[in-house]
Amino acid sequence: MSPTPSAFLRRALWAAALVGLPLGAAVAGDDIRVSVVAILATDKNDKIDPKLECMAKEVHKLDPKLTGFRIAKMTTKSLAMGGKDDFDLCGEQCLHVVVEKKGDEEGRFQMKITPPRMGDITYTTTCGKFFPIMTPFRNKDDELLIIGVRIRPCDGK
């Protein structure tokens, strides 16, 4: 039996594991840069993209069957405060992102995202760090889709 989407979300709070993944530089000015990485995980091989080694170790703790990890797609887009856009992932799936508001003086932002086959998730994120989500989506090769979302630039950083 597959875990529910909320179980995926609870199990996916290993954001520190994705912090080191490079996805585009911050830019000066008022633009908010949203970066999204689509990661595919499998139990059919043990090949791990070097950029995903830390994340793979954390996911493996949650699901030991997943042994192979690769980056399917990385995208960075500029959005205005209150802006929204769709990010193509893989397998005709997309992530809808809305930058709702700047949260506080510590550089946190409130975002609303809609991952494939899951409902809306509204959360406050620290600038520069990835918020990961293990989705219930599997592609035609039975690879599990994992998404990381990051927002930049960070004031004073």
Image (cartoon, rainbow, N blue to C red):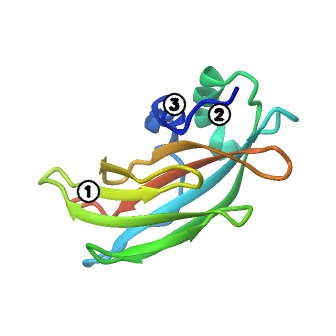
Question: Is 96 positioned to the left or the right of 39 in the image?
Answer: left
Secondary structure under the numbered disc 3 in the rendered image: helix
Pointer 2 with pointer 3, Cβ within 8 A: no
Three-letter amino acid code at disc 2? Ala
Crowding near pointer 2: few (<14 within 10 Å), some, many (20+)?
A: many
Among the two numbered marks 2 and 3 on one chain, the one whose residue lies closer to the N terminus: 3
Callout 3 environment at 10 Å: few (<14), some (14 to 19), or many (20+)? few
Asked which quadrant contains residue 100, the reply is bottom left
* Front tag of 1 and 3: 3
What amino acid is labelled 1 in the image?
Answer: Phe
Residue 81, image quadrant: bottom left
Q: In this figure, which residue is indicated by the disc labeled 1? A: 109
Spatial CA distance of label 1 from label 2 is 26 Å
Between disc 1 and disc 2, whose residue precedes? 2
Q: How many marks?
A: 3
Q: Is residue 96 left or right of residue 32?
A: right
In the rendering, which numbered label is found on residue 18?
none
Residue labelled with disc 2: 56
Q: Nearer the viewer, mark 1 or mark 2?
A: 1
Residue labelled with disc 3:
7
What element does badge 1 sit on?
Answer: strand
Whole-angstrom CA distance, mark 1 to mark 3, is 24 Å
- Is the C terminus in the top left, top right, bottom left or bottom right quadrant? bottom left
